[in-house]
Amino acid sequence: MTGPAVSLAEVGMQFYNPKLKRHHRVLDDINLSVMPREVLCVVGPSGCGKSTLLAGIGGFRKFTEGLCMVDGEPSGEPNRDRGVVFQDYPIMEFLTALENVEIGLCFEKFTLIEHLLPSLRKQRSREVRKIAMEYLSFVGLETHADKYPRELSGGQKQRVAIAQAIAMKPKVLLMDEPFSGLDPDTREKLQLMVLRIHRELNNTIFFVTHDLEEAVFLGNHIIVLSQFSPKRTAEMGATIVYQQELVEYKDSLAKDTPEFHQLIKTLRFHFHNHA
Amino acid sequence: MTPPSQPHSGGEPPAARTRKTFALWRVRGQIPLWTRWILPLLPLGLLLFFYMQAAEARRLDNPMDKLLPLPADFVAAAKASVLPNEFTGEIPIVADLKSSLAIYAVGFGSAVLFSLVFGLHVGAWPWAGNMFDPFLRFLSYLPPLALLPLVLLFLGIGATAKTFLIFIAVAVPLTRSLVLRVEGVNERQIWNAQTLGPTPAEMIWVVIRRITEPGFLDDVRLLIGTAWVYLIAAELIASNAGLGYRINVASRNLNVAQIFLYIAVICLLAFLMDRSIYYINRSRNRWADTK
């Protein structure tokens, strides 16, 4: 694969609000290319359209302008190539942690009838279960396999969500502020896990966050989205105001280096000057 | 800034800040265990007590009184209901239950099945929602009992008409509610599921059905009573068998004890149905907070 994993050309999005009878522009003129195996971090003020950008790339919402290519093809419907992890862990509450990881593999292997009548698939279920268990132990939840999401803490739910997403071996992993509801300790552990996933799966990660430190720690390509670019008028949406490629600082000690702080300072400057 | 003046700095001690309250007198508090069985029985006991007072007073006033039967009359009515009919050899209450429950089962069962299939799809496909939502809303404004004369004209006074009436009365609200439940599923939950590669049928029958199932079964429970209302009403108005029919006959014969008895049977049946669906719901959906 030589081309970019995700490329956006003059992409924009606007909604029509029928109650207010006016168009509401969220994204405007976004040009971006994310290379394979890159960890792209998107930062920007809250409500500026970071999540909408992610939803567009995932195929959950349609960009109203421009062209969005994922893996050389126009981004159509959501599919297995684009895994997603959201902030509020919308995993399947009716399945246990293990079944949540299994379900994607089950969709791959079983027909609808076999889903509704599990007794038809005894032998193959066991194989699927084994694979799912490996992913669950990858995120360190093998002891909670039989718990339902509501019995798990926020961090554990997010681990299930991550295991569920990576079990599909997605080419692009979309993460929408995945750790912003978690305590600092858990958050750091999960950040390290994201790096581990990146190392082992060798995939592209599109990481939305509002935390500059997180962005610098995880990303090797950071973009700052802003609602207010210098030329902006009220009708314009968010656009990229700053882009930076990074050298990798990829272990837990990196957070203390002077380069790390310098980068955060630079980013903060752009973040605030355009927001 | 000056500190706020302290009203109790003088002689008397400050009022206690935590108040000791009686256990039952706490808003949304825990009630003690011993009340759990007594409190639910209290309203029923009170009702029975006042009923007995009134019935005995009437009997003293007029020994031939038939409006408020005494326990002995209930026993007689019960005996009459379980002893075989001298001509046909049928036990009256069994015959009535057979007739009513058959209609109820077919009408209610088909309504639940129809609502499940139709509601899931109307909720899941935006075009289907667009197509059927106004129609369903129109139907839900329609009082099913107003259809009864028409239904009787078209389908006669037999079982078909009553089955149809129950079907309409249950299927419309159940479908509408399920459509709303499906449309209310968190959109990110749908998105998340879509990235796991289900077919549309799997999305509907594996993901959405499971998410909406606890709520759907709760709706089914709520509609048990509604279905009984329409069945009994239809049987009272036009029929030649069933629990409602027997109540109608008893009313013409001024057999109040039998009416009470049959009402109790209907309540008991509805209660048993409600409980069984509740337990099915609880055992199938341990992940949800079923109440």
Image (spheres, coloured by chain):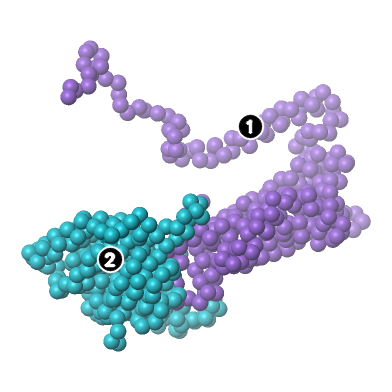
Label 2 secondary element: strand
Chain of the residue displaying label 1: B
The crowding category of the residue bearing disc 1, from other C-alpha atoms within 10 Å (few below 14, some 14 to 19, many at least 20), is few
Tell me the kind of residue under disc 2. Answer: Ile
Percent position (x, y) of residue B40? 57, 39
Percent position (x, y) of residue A52? 37, 64
Percent position (x, y) of residue B172? 67, 57
Residue occupying the point 25% across, 59% down: A230
Q: Which residue is mark 1?
A: B46
Total labels drawn: 2
| Up-down relation of residue A79 to residue A225 (above or below) | below
| Up-down relation of residue B251 to residue A126 (above or below) | above
Q: Which mark is residue A240?
A: 2
Q: Nearer the viewer, residue B141 or A66?
A: A66
Q: Quadrant of the N terminus of chain B?
A: top left
A9 vs B50, left or right, is: left
A140 vs B149, left or right, is: left
Residue occupying the point 76% across, 28% down: B56
Tell me the kind of residue under disc 1. Answer: Leu
Colour cyan, chain: A
Percent position (x, y) of residue B290? 50, 54
| Up-down relation of residue A141 to residue B291 (above or below) | below
Instruction: Point out the residue furthest to the bottom here.
Output: A1
Label 1 secondary element: helix
Instruction: Point out the residue furthest to the top here.
Output: B11
The crowding category of the residue bearing disc 2, from other C-alpha atoms within 10 Å (few below 14, some 14 to 19, many at least 20), is many
**Closer to the eye: label 1 or 2:** 2
Colour purple, chain: B
How far, Cα to Cα, is label 1 from label 2?
73 Å
Question: Can residue B95 be seen by looking at this rendering?
Answer: no
Residue occupying the point 66% across, 33% down: B47
